[in-house]
Image: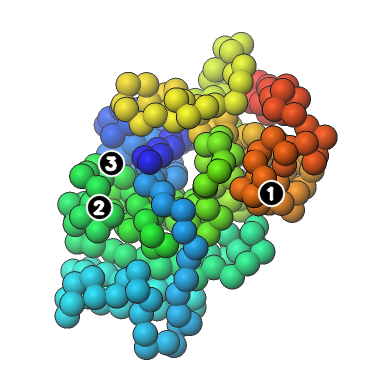
């Protein structure tokens, strides 16, 4: 499934055009032409899987990144990350390895488990699409597939330092935590929660589109369903709000019950369903929605 997310940072002004999501760039997070949401989290193709990788000194590459290009690949290892690139400068791969290590620590801090990222850096978007087994990856900053993160070099390069870090943390959350049996508001909101955690981004900046709606007196009436996340290009602003709504639902749960409880709810929901997991907290879908709406209003009005 294709899962885009957007961001507009109102506090900064950088000249830019219209990107993949059709939004006007006004962001201190990126430079150049790229969608607002790709600036922070990217568009993701997610396959539920568990990350695995050898230790940094292991001579053996994991199967997910083995023999991608034969003799044409360059391997760089971070503290825990493994990065395999093609026609990329070693310095670029080393930077990605450092970022992947940092993103892995962020995901590990939330999930309480070891994270060893596998990152593939092809030479082009077309090659990235081929590795991921999809037709196109236009406008995507990265793709996560079968336990590995595939960088889309043309778009990933346009992100600034904060954007790259959040992209990797968001993707690794999907890879490590899984998404099966969950509604999209929960798995997308949870990945955003981890991605934005410790990023230093102001809430109103990261949820700019939703904040504009709330200031206009339009508070969302329900948690976003699958249709709200349709990446068909028809309403990119609504798509941006869907991700922001999902993020704030998870942020509310963490603020109200604690981060550990949010993680436990996520795991329980994968096993027994989201309604049962919410009931353990004394919540129903209706009561969560009501409290989330109040939270959105309080945070963004």
Q: Please tell me which of labels 3 and 2 falls first in the chain.
A: 2
On residue 268, the disc is 1
279 is higher (above) or lower (below) than 142: above
Towards the viewer: 71 or 64 = 64
Q: What residue did someone put label 2 on?
A: 133
254 vs 171, left or right, is right
Towards the viewer: 291 or 205 = 291
86 is higher (above) or lower (below) than 200: below
Residue at the spot 57% in from the left edge and 59% down from the top edge: 107
Residue 214 placement (x, y as % from top left): 60, 18
Q: Please tell me which of labels 3 and 1 falls first in the chain.
A: 3
Instruction: Return the residue found at the far front.
Output: 272
Instruction: Return the residue found at the far right.
Output: 282
On residue 139, the disc is 3
State whether residue 43 appears in this view: yes
Q: Quadrant of residue 183?
A: top right
- State the CA–CA distance, disc 3 to disc 1: 34 Å
- State the CA–CA distance, disc 3 to disc 2: 16 Å
Give the structural element (helix, strand or loop) at label 1.
Answer: helix
164 is higher (above) or lower (below) than 201: below
On residue 85, the disc is none
Residue at the spot 28% in from the left edge and 48% down from the top edge: 155
Give the structural element (helix, strand or loop) at label 3.
Answer: loop
Give the crowd class for mark 2: few <14, some 14-19, many >=20 residues within 10 Å.
few
Asked if disc 3 and disc 1 are in contact, CB closer than 8 Å, the reply is: no
Residue 259 placement (x, y as % from top left): 72, 50
Closer to the observer: label 3 or label 2?
Answer: 2
Residue 124 placement (x, y as % from top left): 19, 56
Placement of the N terminus among the 4 image quadrants: top left
Residue at the spot 52% in from the left edge and 36% down from the top edge: 184
């Amino acid at each position: 499934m294709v899962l885009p997310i957007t961001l507009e940072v109102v506090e900064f002004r950088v000249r830019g055009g219209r990107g993949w999501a059709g939004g006007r760039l006004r962001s201190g997070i990126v430079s150049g032409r790229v969608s607002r949401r790709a600036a922070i989290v990217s568009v993701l193709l997610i396959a539920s899987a568990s990350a695995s990788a050898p230790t940094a000194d292991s001579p053996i590459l994991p199967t997910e990144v083995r023999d991608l290009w034969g003799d044409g690949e360059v391997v760089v290892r971070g503290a825990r990350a493994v990065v395999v690139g093609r026609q990329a400068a070693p310095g670029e791969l080393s930077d990605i390895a450092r970022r992947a290590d940092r993103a892995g620590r962020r995901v590990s801090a939330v999930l309480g488990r070891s994270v060893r990222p596998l990152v593939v850096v092809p030479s082009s978007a077309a090659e990235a699409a081929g590795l991921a087994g999809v037709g196109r990856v236009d406008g995507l900053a990265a793709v996560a597939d079968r336990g590995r993160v595939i960088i889309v070099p043309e778009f990933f390069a346009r992100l600034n330092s904060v954007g790259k870090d959040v992209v990797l943390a968001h993707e690794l959350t999907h890879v490590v935590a899984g998404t099966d049996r969950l509604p999209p508001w929960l798995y997308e909101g949870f990945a955003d929660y981890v991605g934005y955690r410790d990023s230093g981004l102001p809430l109103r900046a990261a949820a700019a589109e939703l904040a504009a709606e709330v200031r206009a007196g339009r508070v969302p009436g329900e948690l976003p369903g699958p249709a709200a996340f349709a990446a068909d290009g028809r309403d990119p602003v609504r798509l941006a709000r869907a991700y922001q709504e999902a993020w704030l639902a998870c942020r509310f749960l963490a603020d109200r019950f604690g981060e550990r409880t949010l993680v436990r709810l996520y795991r329980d929901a994968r096993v027994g369903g989201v309604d049962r997991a919410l009931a353990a907290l004394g919540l129903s879908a209706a009561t969560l929605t009501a409290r989330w709406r109040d939270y959105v209003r309080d945070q963004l009005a």
